[in-house]
């Protein structure tokens, strides 16, 4: 499993903006390319665009992937994250 950075903090503290800017800098920085994947842990429900940051500068994995009526679990989230990270390498 590749190394990762985790950005944590309270709601509306700028986590998404920081993550997007950091990933962009790593991806297109001066003379180097680091594969990046932004994975948002709380935006899995499709029908909740107002209370989640689904409008981002960069696409984020696991955003709007399941209905609020669907089943989602820690195991499903873990599998989704692993799939996204494996696809970035």
Image (cartoon, helix red, strand yellow):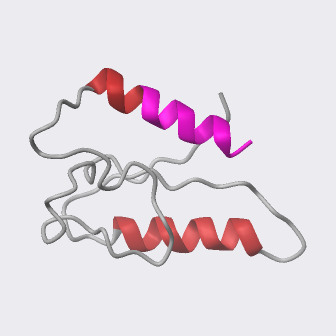
Q: Which residues are magenta?
A: 79-89
Q: Residue at x 53, y 31 (%)?
A: 82
Q: Is residue 82 magenta?
A: yes
Residue 11 at what x, y percent from top left?
19, 63
Residue 30 at what x, y percent from top left?
84, 77
Q: Residue at x 45, y 52 (%)?
A: 61
Using residue 8 as the reference point, say whether residue 50 is left or right of it. left
Say which of 68 and 41 sits in front.
68
* Relative vertical location of residue 9 with respect to residue 4 in this rendering, above or below: below
Residue 3 visible, this orientation: no
Q: Residue at x 54, y 74 (%)?
A: 21
Question: Image quarter for residue 86?
Answer: top right
* Relative vertical location of residue 13 with respect to residue 42 in this rendering, above or below: below
Residue furthest right as drawn: 31
Residue 63 at what x, y percent from top left?
34, 55
Say which of 26 and 76 sits in front.
76
């Amino acid at each position: 499993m590749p190394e990762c950075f985790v950005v944590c903090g309270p709601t509306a503290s700028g986590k998404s903006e920081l993550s997007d800017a950091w990933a962009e800098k790593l991806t297109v920085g001066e003379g180097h390319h680091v594969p990046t994947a932004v994975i948002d842990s709380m935006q899995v429900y499709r029908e909740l665009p107002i209370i989640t940051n689904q409008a981002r500068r960069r696409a984020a994995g696991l955003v709007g992937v399941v209905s609020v009526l669907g089943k989602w679990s820690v195991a499903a989230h873990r599998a989704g994250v692993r799939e996204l990270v494996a696809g970035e390498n």
